[in-house]
Amino acid sequence: MRALIVEDDVKMAGLIRRGLLEEGYAADVAARGEDAIWMASATEYDAIVLDVMLPGIDGFEVCRRLRQAGVWSPVLMLTARDAVEDRIAGLDTGADDYLTKPFAFAELLARLRALARRGPVEQPPVIEVGDLRLDPRSHQVWRGEKEIDLSQKEFALLEILMRRPGQVVSRFDLLEHAWDYSYENRSNIIDVYVRYLREKIDRPFRVRSIETVRGAGYRLRADGGRSA
């Protein structure tokens, strides 16, 4: 395994690198976020150990820029801050795991092994299908540059469809992902909400992106729609 360690604390970076080398891994070190971005873009790392507190751009911004650049090496974020909002921010910018300082090196090693087994998995923070964009963090949706206001259930259904572009999603799958078991009126609720969605994301823009597949369910066109 080849890892990139992004840490401005020389002593900490040295300890992590030495530990990885003793385990037989190759390890490079970047002290600044800007250096980490070009290094990770030029080399395919099996894992990136990324400290949050860095000079210049911080670890959150580094992770966000890496994902935007199409770098999907698994990222383990390190931080001295244990606040829940910091962990959420790290994961939402595209990190795969989170470890709070101080930590045992054995745990860091185990987490890196798990990430390396998983391998690069493309999971962009903002989902795009054609000119449709959906941000799961902020619960915002855009068609082109126009923001679209959706209810929670409309948003949930659209997210499921956008995560499977070009694939048929059954009414049952849509129902199970957006409504819990306590919801009783489960007869035609999906059809009703798909109609709501079409009125908001398709009709005003003269496109048809959500297709009905008779007897099977619904499908979001992979190209985001066509002229009506």
Image (cartoon, rainbow, N blue to C red):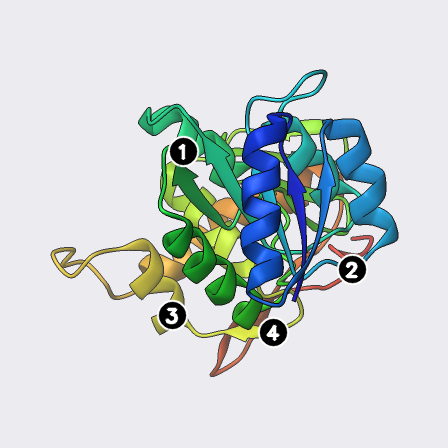
Q: Earlier in the sequence, mark 3 or mark 1?
A: 1
**Distance CA(mark 3)–CA(mark 2):** 36 Å
Using the rendered image of the protein, determine whether residue 200 is visible from the camera's viewpoint: no
Q: Amino acid at mark 4?
A: Gln
The residue at 54%/72% (across/down) is 117
Q: Earlier in the sequence, mark 4 or mark 2?
A: 2
**Residue 99 x/y as whole percent:** 41, 41
**Distance CA(mark 4)–CA(mark 2):** 30 Å
Q: Which residue is mark 1?
A: 87
Q: Earlier in the sequence, mark 3 or mark 2?
A: 2
Q: Are marks 4 and 2 in contact (CB under 8 Å)?
A: no
The residue at 63%/28% (across/down) is 10
**Distance CA(mark 2)–CA(mark 1):** 25 Å
Q: Earlier in the sequence, mark 2 or mark 1?
A: 2
Q: Which residue is mark 3?
A: 173
**Residue 204 x/y as whole percent:** 68, 37
Q: Which residue is mark 2?
A: 44
**Distance CA(mark 3)–CA(mark 1):** 30 Å
Q: Where 117 falls versus 63 (above or below)?
A: below
Q: Nearest the camera: 147 or 15?
A: 15
**Disc 3 packing (10 Å; few <14; some 14–19; many ≥20):** few
Q: Are marks 2 and 1 in contact (CB under 8 Å)?
A: no
The quarter of the displayed image where residue 166 is located: bottom right
**Disc 4 packing (10 Å; few <14; some 14–19; many ≥20):** some
